[in-house]
Image: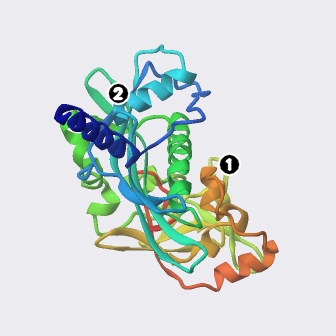
Amino acid sequence: MKKMMQLLLTFVAIISFSQSKEAIKFKGNILNYTENTYKSFKVIDQREDKQIGTLPFGEQKEMREVVFPTTPDNDFSAWYLKSNQTGASTEFVMVLKRLKLSTGGSDGKKTEGKLDFYAQTFAKNGDKYQFLYKKDTVFTFYDKEVSELMVKNIPSIFSVFIKKSYSLNPVGNSVSFNELGDYSNYVNNNYAALKEGQLKDGIYLDYISFFNQTPEPGSYTFELNNKGDITRAVKEENGKKTKIPAHKMFAYVENGKAHKMTFSGFLDLDKDENGFYITANRGHLFPVQMNSTYGMFGLIGGVAGAIEQGARQKKMKNGDVGKVYIDSLTGEYDFPDE
């Protein structure tokens, strides 16, 4: 009888333990339809805190720990093989830096949730790694069942991030495994724009040429419209004119001062101890229909009702402005909270 009771208690404990877990379901696909083919998918888990989060689920607000079904490496490799054939000699590597879920305040109807996400991707040949893409941000959700919503969207966030990585060619110098842990600092320490005091005057077509301080060769002059805005840069050499439209420029530097091309035209690009930044808000940097993280990352639910586009754009531009940094690894705007 005593043994039976012990077995029963053990069984109840096992059931209770299994019910306290909420496993991520990797639905959908991470199909690689680009020409950059990979033979396999490898995850290097560099998270300092391996706990994703313990959140309230269901009407009873039962606390459950969000977990990977097995391990990140096994789960992503299996997900990759569901929709991709093996081939080529290059390995796709994702370095997982951070994945944290938390819930916050509630208005009685909806609860705030935050998904803290940080990952980098690399193409690996032999024992060397070459950078592809990076995303370091916090996604904010508001929903009655915010825990369920966040867990449901984890695969969507990874899917968009991974597919974006597929579309990019490796950039920068190849590095060893030991240099992956501090890759951002490794790159920043080698960027001329971040090391040197004076920027070189000229036209820069992308973020890599800007941070490496390699402007377009030759001397360009600017053409302006009747509002005084730059429309293009023009170079005349050996009787031949070369024109660069403003929208194709990443930035230009004049008299040592940088100006970044944005949705609202050229804005001053300043620098402090954290890097280069623009003083702006989302309304200055994105058209309103592009400003939804839900739209950009294909997230499920949580989208506010539609508002007239022009009014939304004006409202966004009238909002508070602050420092918006340029990510030196991707050239993207670095918002602390998406």
The picture places residue 264, in percent across and down from the top left corner, at 66, 72
> In the rendered image, which residue does mark 2 sit on?
124
Query: Of marks 1 and 2, which one's residue comes earlier in the chain?
Result: 2
- Where does the image place residue 205, in percent across and percent down from the top left? 54, 53
How far from the left and from the top, in percent, is residue 34?
Answer: 60, 28
Farthest right residue? 308
Disc count in the image? 2
SS label for mark 2: strand
Of 321 and 197, which appears nearest the observer? 321
149 relative to 128 in the view: left or right:
right
- Residue at 45% over, 25% down: 78
Label 1 and label 2: CA atoms lie apart by 46 Å
Q: Which residue shows up at 66% across the image and 56% down it?
A: 295
Q: Are marks 1 and 2 in contact (CB under 8 Å)?
A: no
- In the rendered structure, the answer to whether residue 263 lies left or right of residue 112 reads right
Three-letter residue code for mark 1 = Gly
Q: Residue at x 58, y 24 (%)?
A: 35
- Label 1: which residue? 239
- On screen, residue 148 above or below 181: below
The image quadrant of residue 185 is bottom left
Residue at disc 1, secondary structure:
loop
Relative side of 19 to 319, left or right: left
Q: State left or right for residue 245 relative to residue 141.
A: right
Q: Nearer the viewer, residue 89 or 106?
A: 106
